[in-house]
Amino acid sequence: MNDNPRFVSTLTRNTLALILAGGRGTRLKNLTDWRAKPAVPFGGKFRIIDFPLSNCVNSGVRRIGVVTQYKAQSLIRHIQRGWSFLDGRFKEFIELLPAQQRTDEETWYQGTADAVFQNLDIIREHNPGYVLILGGDHIYKMDYGRILAEHAEKQADLTIACLEVPLKDASAFGVMAVDEGWRITGFTEKPAHPDPIPGKPGHALVSMGIYVFSAKLLYEQLILDHDLEDSSHDFGKDVIPRMVASNARVYAHRFQDSCVNMILDTPYWRDVGTVDAYWEANIDLTTVTPDLNLYDEDWPIWTYQEQLPPAKFVFDDDNRRGQALDSMVSGGCIISGATIRRSLLFSNVQVREHSIIEDSVILPDVHIGEHVRLKRVVVEKGCQIPGNIEIGFHPEQDKKHFYVTNTGITLVVPEMLHQHVHHTR
């Protein structure tokens, strides 16, 4: 593969990235009642969309459109506050592309391909050689320069980043078959009975929803798809299988070839689309060596940085000691005579005396009263947890008031506590 930096930098400069950030994320339950999934907070101070945006900026892809639709206000505000540092004089930008009924049909975005089709005039205006299409709702670190270089070298029409997953999980993805040269010979979106990789019966090769298109071919495919009345206008369901069937040059790119900060040669990619997966990925960050490295200065994750005082721990008496063990605690937090264990606290969390928080994810601006016990709980932004309450110890009791997953993670949002907070979150 061509690793010449000049070659890669020419490619990345000639690429327009589109991040599809319109998703509802219904499996995250009440966490997406008032925000799109890409705007959900993650990792103590970030939001999910910061990961693909940071990958773009770090890769040198600095012409970026963010396609929004569902409950986008907090996402739009986050991008305006935290991502306005690119300089238009160098043709670098992050542009918001809300569903604004730009075509004759006057519809909202119907599917992933339609979301791009409705912005074709804007894409053409930027005149890119390549269009990089990304989801806005996965946590991973990837050098997009490498997939672009592979795409150009193979003279591909479309390159799809792929990942090996256990066969039992593959039904949630687009599953592909490839030949020896990694050309895709078959592609099925979310099959009930996915085919395994030859020689690896327990695994399937799946699409990550990361696509590199040669621009002119993308335009042709989207116009063709738009005119088909029986199409659901989706890349995975319609456009990609049609391209593979028509013998277009469609290739798979192995994620491990472009993943940044791999630990033990295992690429990190998480769909935090369920409450369990969201809790698990956040809690993993509190371990001694997490699977995701947030401390890497060569590939930083950028975000909107609120100006906050450092975290503070007060009182050191035997019966009330402000302490956090095996935890991550963000700026603006005050731990006042309480104990935090194996938990992740976002900004501006206050925990009062004699409370014990264990294995929990506490989002920003939460106030926790005295003598509170929380275990395996996700607390939504803005909650005021009253004193003398236990959550996470009695599932049947908790289910009467809160959302409890099958594995026993409890989600608490202000409405469940009969509290009212502003609804952009």
Image (cartoon, grey):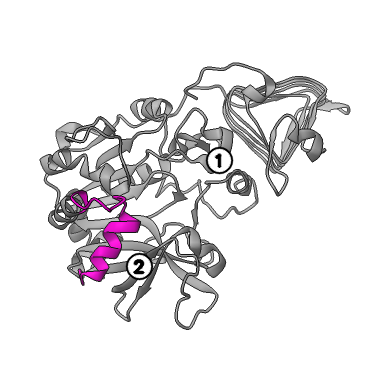
Residues shaded magenta:
225-248
Which of the two labelled residues, at mark 1 and mark 2, occupies the earlier sequence position? Answer: 1
The residue located at (34%, 55%) in the rendering is 210
Q: Which residue is mark 2?
A: 187
Q: Amino acid at mark 2?
A: Phe
Whether residue 155 sits left or right of residue 414 in the image: it is left
The residue located at (67%, 18%) in the rendering is 418
The disc at residue 28 is: 1
The residue located at (59%, 52%) in the rendering is 290
Q: Secondary structure at mark 1?
A: helix
Which of the 4 quarters of the picture holds residue 279?
top right
Q: Position of residue 103 (x, y in %)?
A: 18, 35
Q: CA distance from mark 1 to mark 2?
A: 28 Å
Of 408 and 44, nearer the camera is 408
Whether residue 8 sits left or right of residue 179 in the image: it is left
Inspect this view and state whether residue 301 appears: no
Q: Position of residue 66 (x, y in %)?
A: 30, 38
Q: Position of residue 157 (x, y in %)?
A: 19, 63
Q: Nearer the viewer, mark 1 or mark 2?
A: 2
Inspect this view and state whether residue 234 appears: yes
Q: Amino acid at mark 1?
A: Leu
The residue located at (30%, 29%) in the rendering is 84
**Residue 46 on the magenta segment:** no
Of 4 and 258, nearer the camera is 258
